[in-house]
Image: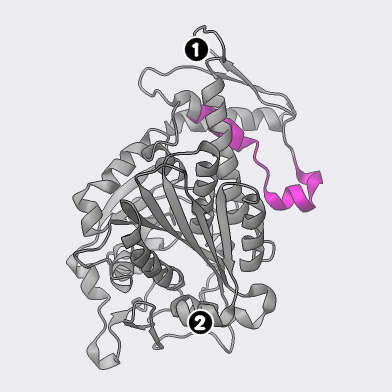
Amino acid sequence: MRSVSEAAYAGVKRALEAGARRPVLALQPHPRFPRAPLVALLAALEAAYCPLQSRESFPHLVQRPEALGVYGEGEGEGEGLHPLAPTIACAVALETARCLARDVGGGDPERMSPLQAACHLQQAFQGTRCRVRVETDAQHIRDHYPLLAAVSRAADQVPRHRGCIVFLEYEPEQYEKTLMFVGKGVTYDTGGADVKINGAMAGMSRDKCGAATVAGFLKACELLRPELKVVAALGFARNSIGADSYVADELVRARCGRVVRVGNTDAEGRMVMADLLYQMRVQASQERSPHLYTVATLTGHAHRAYGPGYTAAVDSHVAHAQRHASRLRRAGEQLGDMLEVSRVRREDLRAHRACAATGAELLQALPQPSAATPRGHQGPAAFLLQVAKLDEEDAPPFTHLDIAASAGDHPHHPVPATLLALAAHYGLIAC
């Protein structure tokens, strides 16, 4: 499926670069891959994507087609709607959702600062079935989301960089399943006091692609109307350097009540998501058949372990008993959205239990980078499990999606990794 996607993308991209303004894409059925026409059409639409800031501020750099023609070879004859109509409608809805995710994920640190990202999402969902609420009160965030507040502390001294939380909710009239997402929205990651060096800071405006992907999935739900309730909490913050930066060895009491010792300020993503995840865990007891997710560009280790283009899917013990990550992986493969299944082991849980002598119950991170740490992407999942009390027997199923290796490489356009896999798995795609 990835070969189909790459071929369609390359063909349309080459046509546009040659000056074509009304290219036509020929879709052919594939004997092995029934969704090949949809994947090819999605790739063609992606090839025509132009970044938000180019559209807004630098239109002279924009090269977009006037129209995209679609010819469906071997699609057969029929009365009423053209046989291609459902495929085209689905592709347009999914590309609209992916475009929103790219706009948020790819925006530079000023255009898509925390408050700007929140404003953009409010506009994107205005007048739709998806409800939006933005929490900007700094004292409320400090009181109820202390781990996120610690990360945002230095940036909060600059008014336009202040952190915020965006809550999204899509609720149809009838549903039996509830998805609960927490997205990492770090709009720029300097590493904080554990500053990134050797050029590693370039591209860190993409550290909000987890939140961007979740927002895109909500947009897909709003357009395709599945019988599925979806709630999301997107933690937007900037991990800045300054006199008020949080530092290693700080003790912070998390929303769940457990005391966390900071080990590395460049492990800010789990801090941004942790209290929001616990809030979801509590709320889950009131929801119908809930499943919790975190989506984040979290660790270099996920890239080291699986290579570019692959999401690391880590199930909790409850989700693993349901073989959830394996089923999500199979759904993603239908559309070329690739996942690898990973596991939390007892060593990962132990690695994040703090020494009692430090006065803490949980250790946020080891001092060294994740790529230099054994089991460097499983450990953060284990931390999230424990700080949100999802390691308990009565916990709802939880899956952590580390998209650090699959969200695209700067300076190329960001990739809304796992959006298509989730859409396929939860029945948003009928064609």
Q: Is residue 239 visible?
A: yes
* Crowd rating for badge 1 (residues with CA inside 10 Å; few <14, some 14–19, many 20+): few
Residue wearing tag 2: 142
Please give left or right for residue 274 compared with residue 161 in the image. left
For the residues labelled 2 and 1, say whether their Cβ atoms are less than 8 Å apart: no
Q: Nearer the viewer, residue 338 or 153?
A: 153
Q: Quadrant of the N terminus?
A: top left
The rendered magenta stretch, by its main secondary structure, is classed as helix
Farthest residue toward the right? 60
In the displayed structure, 382 sits above or below 431; it is below
What's the amino acid at mark 1?
A: Glu
Judging from the image, what secondary structure is the residue with disc 1 in?
loop
Q: Residue at x 40, y 70 (%)?
A: 274
Q: Secondary structure at mark 2?
A: helix
Q: Is residue 265 visible?
A: no
Disc 2 residue crowd, few under 14, some 14–19, many 20+, Cα 10 Å: some
Q: Which residue is rendered at x = 57% and y = 77% of the image? A: 240
Quarter occupied by residue 261: bottom left
User: Disc 2 and disc 1: Cα gap in Å?
Assistant: 57 Å
Asked whether 16 or 243 is in front, the reply is 243
Which region is colored magenta? Answer: 39-62
The single residue placed furthest to the front in the displayed view is 173
- Which quarter of the rendered picture does the C terminus lie within? top left
